[in-house]
Image: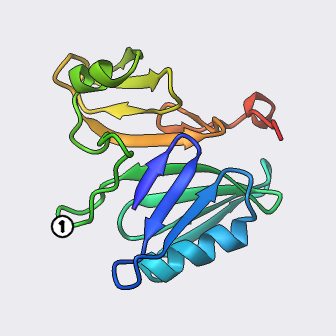
Protein backbone atom coordinates (compact mmCIF):
# COMPACT_ATOMS: atom_id res chain seq x y z
CA UNK A 1 0.00 0.00 0.00
CA UNK A 2 1.20 3.50 -0.84
CA UNK A 3 -0.24 6.83 0.19
CA UNK A 4 0.37 10.01 -1.77
CA UNK A 5 -0.67 13.63 -1.89
CA UNK A 6 -3.36 12.61 -4.40
CA UNK A 7 -4.81 9.52 -2.68
CA UNK A 8 -4.03 5.86 -1.95
CA UNK A 9 -2.70 3.02 -4.10
CA UNK A 10 -3.16 -0.63 -3.17
CA UNK A 11 -1.54 -3.65 -4.80
CA UNK A 12 -3.13 -7.07 -4.36
CA UNK A 13 -0.23 -9.42 -3.58
CA UNK A 14 -1.84 -12.45 -5.22
CA UNK A 15 -3.26 -10.92 -8.42
CA UNK A 16 -0.87 -7.92 -8.64
CA UNK A 17 -3.97 -5.81 -9.38
CA UNK A 18 -3.26 -2.14 -8.66
CA UNK A 19 -6.13 0.03 -7.43
CA UNK A 20 -5.68 3.78 -7.19
CA UNK A 21 -8.13 5.82 -5.14
CA UNK A 22 -7.85 9.56 -5.74
CA UNK A 23 -9.26 12.31 -3.55
CA UNK A 24 -12.76 13.16 -4.73
CA UNK A 25 -13.67 9.60 -5.72
CA UNK A 26 -16.80 7.97 -4.25
CA UNK A 27 -16.13 7.22 -0.58
CA UNK A 28 -17.95 3.89 -0.64
CA UNK A 29 -15.82 2.64 -3.53
CA UNK A 30 -12.59 3.69 -1.75
CA UNK A 31 -13.70 2.05 1.51
CA UNK A 32 -14.62 -1.15 -0.36
CA UNK A 33 -11.20 -1.25 -2.09
CA UNK A 34 -9.42 -0.78 1.24
CA UNK A 35 -11.60 -3.36 2.99
CA UNK A 36 -10.77 -5.89 0.26
CA UNK A 37 -7.08 -5.26 0.93
CA UNK A 38 -7.02 -4.73 4.71
CA UNK A 39 -10.08 -6.56 6.01
CA UNK A 40 -12.95 -4.99 7.89
CA UNK A 41 -12.50 -1.53 9.37
CA UNK A 42 -12.17 -1.42 13.15
CA UNK A 43 -14.03 1.86 13.60
CA UNK A 44 -16.37 4.20 11.75
CA UNK A 45 -17.16 7.60 13.25
CA UNK A 46 -19.40 10.45 12.17
CA UNK A 47 -18.85 14.15 12.80
CA UNK A 48 -22.31 15.40 11.89
CA UNK A 49 -21.49 19.06 12.59
CA UNK A 50 -18.83 19.04 9.87
CA UNK A 51 -20.46 16.40 7.66
CA UNK A 52 -17.46 14.07 7.97
CA UNK A 53 -17.20 10.30 8.25
CA UNK A 54 -13.98 8.63 9.41
CA UNK A 55 -13.16 4.97 8.70
CA UNK A 56 -10.18 3.37 10.49
CA UNK A 57 -8.36 0.08 9.88
CA UNK A 58 -6.16 -1.83 12.32
CA UNK A 59 -2.95 -0.91 10.48
CA UNK A 60 -3.39 2.77 11.39
CA UNK A 61 -4.93 4.00 8.14
CA UNK A 62 -7.90 6.33 8.50
CA UNK A 63 -9.82 7.92 5.64
CA UNK A 64 -12.13 10.90 5.88
CA UNK A 65 -15.16 11.34 3.66
CA UNK A 66 -17.58 14.20 3.11
CA UNK A 67 -20.71 14.24 0.97
CA UNK A 68 -19.91 10.74 -0.29
CA UNK A 69 -16.41 11.71 -1.45
CA UNK A 70 -12.98 10.58 -0.21
CA UNK A 71 -11.17 13.77 0.94
CA UNK A 72 -8.32 12.87 3.33
CA UNK A 73 -6.16 10.04 4.65
CA UNK A 74 -4.21 9.87 7.89
CA UNK A 75 -1.71 7.21 8.95
CA UNK A 76 -0.26 6.34 12.34
CA UNK A 77 1.22 3.12 13.62
CA UNK A 78 -0.93 1.86 16.49
CA UNK A 79 0.82 -1.48 17.04
CA UNK A 80 4.47 -2.56 16.85
CA UNK A 81 3.75 -5.34 14.36
CA UNK A 82 1.46 -3.33 12.07
CA UNK A 83 2.33 -2.92 8.40
CA UNK A 84 4.19 0.25 7.45
CA UNK A 85 2.42 2.52 5.02
CA UNK A 86 4.63 4.92 3.08
CA UNK A 87 4.67 7.35 0.17
CA UNK A 88 6.17 6.29 -3.19
CA UNK A 89 9.47 7.95 -2.17
CA UNK A 90 9.55 6.15 1.18
CA UNK A 91 8.24 8.74 3.61
CA UNK A 92 6.38 7.20 6.51
CA UNK A 93 6.74 6.21 10.15
CA UNK A 94 10.27 6.67 11.35
CA UNK A 95 11.26 9.19 8.67
CA UNK A 96 13.23 11.98 10.36
CA UNK A 97 12.79 15.70 9.87
CA UNK A 98 16.22 15.75 8.21
CA UNK A 99 15.10 13.06 5.75
CA UNK A 100 11.84 14.90 5.03
CA UNK A 101 13.85 18.02 4.20
CA UNK A 102 16.09 16.05 1.82
CA UNK A 103 13.01 15.02 -0.20
CA UNK A 104 11.06 18.30 -0.25
CA UNK A 105 10.78 21.72 1.37
CA UNK A 106 9.47 21.05 4.87
CA UNK A 107 8.42 23.45 7.59
CA UNK A 108 8.32 22.34 11.18
CA UNK A 109 6.71 24.05 14.18
CA UNK A 110 7.27 22.95 17.80
CA UNK A 111 4.14 22.03 19.75
CA UNK A 112 5.22 21.12 23.27
CA UNK A 113 7.57 18.14 23.02
CA UNK A 114 6.40 17.38 19.47
CA UNK A 115 6.60 19.08 16.08
CA UNK A 116 3.98 19.58 13.43
CA UNK A 117 5.38 19.43 9.89
CA UNK A 118 4.16 20.34 6.43
CA UNK A 119 5.86 19.66 3.12
CA UNK A 120 5.55 21.69 -0.06
CA UNK A 121 4.35 18.59 -1.90
CA UNK A 122 1.21 18.03 0.15
CA UNK A 123 1.98 16.11 3.36
CA UNK A 124 1.34 17.18 6.97
CA UNK A 125 1.77 15.47 10.27
CA UNK A 126 3.39 15.04 13.67
CA UNK A 127 7.02 14.33 14.60
CA UNK A 128 7.81 12.75 17.97
CA UNK A 129 10.38 15.39 18.97
CA UNK A 130 10.88 19.09 18.38
CA UNK A 131 14.34 18.73 16.87
CA UNK A 132 15.99 17.50 13.65
CA UNK A 133 15.93 13.86 14.89
CA UNK A 134 12.17 13.87 15.40
CA UNK A 135 10.50 11.06 13.43
CA UNK A 136 7.12 10.88 11.74
CA UNK A 137 4.45 9.34 13.97
CA UNK A 138 1.40 10.70 12.12
CA UNK A 139 1.19 11.67 8.46
CA UNK A 140 -1.80 12.85 6.42
CA UNK A 141 -2.77 14.41 3.12
CA UNK A 142 -5.86 15.70 1.37
CA UNK A 143 -8.16 18.42 2.56
CA UNK A 144 -7.01 19.94 5.82
CA UNK A 145 -9.44 18.83 8.50
CA UNK A 146 -7.04 18.61 11.45
CA UNK A 147 -5.44 21.33 13.53
CA UNK A 148 -2.44 19.60 15.07
CA UNK A 149 -3.66 16.52 16.86
CA UNK A 150 -7.33 17.46 16.84
CA UNK A 151 -10.05 17.66 14.26
CA UNK A 152 -10.72 21.32 13.53
CA UNK A 153 -13.69 22.07 15.78
CA UNK A 154 -14.89 25.10 13.89
CA UNK A 155 -16.10 23.66 10.57
CA UNK A 156 -15.89 27.10 8.95
CA UNK A 157 -12.07 26.73 9.12
CA UNK A 158 -12.14 23.50 7.11
CA UNK A 159 -11.42 23.74 3.40
CA UNK A 160 -14.53 22.81 1.39
CA UNK A 161 -12.90 22.90 -2.04
CA UNK A 162 -14.42 20.69 -4.70
* Mark 1: secondary structure: loop
Q: How many marks?
A: 1
Above or below: residue 116 compared with residue 123:
above
Residue 124 lies, in percent from the top left, at 47, 32
Above or below: residue 44 compared with residue 137:
below
Residue 106 lies, in percent from the top left, at 40, 17
Residue 48 lies, in percent from the top left, at 78, 57
Occupied quadrant, residue 78: bottom left
Above or below: residue 94 compared with residue 2:
above
Question: What colour scheme has been applied to the protein in the rendered image?
Answer: rainbow
Q: Residue at x 53, y 30 (%)?
A: 122
Left or right, residue 149 beside residue 50: left
Occupied quadrant, residue 156: top right
Relative depth, front residue between 22 and 72: 22
Residue 91 lies, in percent from the top left, at 32, 39
Disc 1 crowd rating (10 Å Cα; few below 14, some 14-19, many 20+) is: few
Above or below: residue 126 compared with residue 131:
below
Q: Residue at x 22, y 20 (%)?
A: 98
Relative depth, front residue between 48 and 37: 37
The residue beneath circle 1 is 81
Q: Residue furthest front?
A: 16
Q: Residue at x 49, y 31 (%)?
A: 148
Left or right, residue 147 beside residue 37: right
Q: Residue at x 27, y 64 (%)?
A: 83
Relative depth, front residue between 89 and 85: 89
Left or right, residue 162 beside residue 122: right
- Quadrant location of the N terminus? bottom left
- Quadrant location of the C terminus? top right
Relative depth, front residue between 107 and 46: 107
Amino acid sequence: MEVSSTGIKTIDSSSQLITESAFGEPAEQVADNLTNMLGAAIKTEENHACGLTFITWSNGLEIANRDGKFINWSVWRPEENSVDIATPDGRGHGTTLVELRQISETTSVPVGDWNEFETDDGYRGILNANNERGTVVVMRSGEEIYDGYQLIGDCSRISFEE
